[in-house]
Amino acid sequence: MIPAVVHTLRLYGIQAWFSYRALYAWSTPFNYLSSKFGFPFFTMILFVYMGKFVGLQDPIYIVIGNILLMPISNSIYGVSMAIANEKDFGALSYLLGSPAPRATRFLGRALFQILDGFITVAVALPIAIWIFHIDLVVINLPLVLFCTILITITTCGIGFLMGSIALVSRDGWMITNTLGLALYILVGVNFPVAVLPSSLQTVAFALPITRGMIAARLALAGAGWSEVMPLIWGEMLVGLIYTLIGYVMFRLLERRSLVNGTLDNL
């Protein structure tokens, strides 16, 4: 029993590391840092000035929202690319022909993306606190950190789903990119979800990150664990549902490819 568990964990860690390395093998440190911090920073500045244009004097809400959304570059884009690239670079047949457990290989695409996304927020948030003089006295720091890692994990569910879709659609990346941009509107990044029309509020709460974003904001305002636990449980549930849907879709596509005999052309 124990050797089997150790073997599974070893397999999970090794393939997760090589998957992450393969995704960024083309990148230089400058390109990596530019994509990691450059786009989110200038996007945040854009929304801050848009807020000032409409009369919003305090940019803290927008700044915090954009920082909490930073993990999507890993959790959504990174995970979906790590799955879809197996087909694009001709490695899908080897993946499907491997005797390794499918869940281990599929879910392993997210491990280092989660760590990377969390580190990104862990670096950006203290800088924002310093620049914008956010009051540290009331912050529930352990809860903020927990909500950050939770958001990073649950949004991987969208990445798993989009990665599976990209295996059968030439428009997979366009769909993923459009959804990533839609999150700026739907999940309370630049304004509260409550100001959205009721139909869009329903969509917002059907997405990972919405409840986690609200919980993180409450923690920054000093809320305790008991106050945000309903949001945390809801966030976990939604993220799990997306992950399961993505995995089930991947397994169905695998069976379809084996029947059709087109492993690299799903």
Image (cartoon, rainbow, N blue to C red):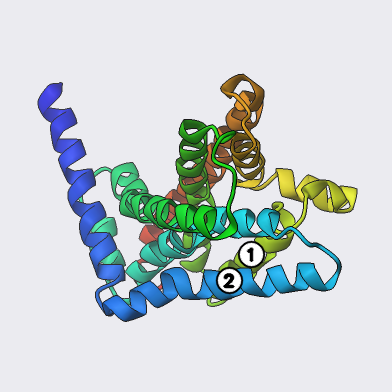
Is residue 241 rendered to the left or right of residue 156? right
Q: Position of residue 196 (x, y in %)?
A: 85, 53
Would residue 58 appear left or right of 126 to someone viewing this image?
Answer: right
Measured as percent of width and height from the top left, residue 57 is found at 78, 62
Read off the residue under disc 2: 177
Few, some or many residues within 10 Å of mark 1 (<14, 14–19, 20+): some
SS label for mark 2: helix
Quarter of the C terminus within the rendering: bottom left
Residue 238 position, x and y percent, is 60, 39
Which residue is identified by label 1? Answer: 179
Position of the N terminus by quadrant: top left
Q: Amino acid at mark 1?
A: Leu
Q: Contact (CB < 8 A) between labels 1 and 2?
A: yes
Amino acid at circle 2 = Asn
Q: Residue at x 53, y 63 (%)?
A: 165
Quadrant location of residue 169?
A: bottom right
Is there any visible trace of residue 169 in the rendered image? no
Q: What residue sits 53% from the left and 52% below the top? A: 129
Query: Residue drawn at (70%, 70%), measured in percent from left and top?
Result: 47
Q: Residues within 10 Å of mark 2 (few under 14, many from 20)?
A: some
Q: Is residue 250 visible?
A: yes
Given residues 149 and 177, the one toward you in this image is 149
The residue drawn where x is 53% and y is 57% is: 128
Camera-nearest residue between 182 and 159? 182
- 139 with respect to 198 (left or right): left
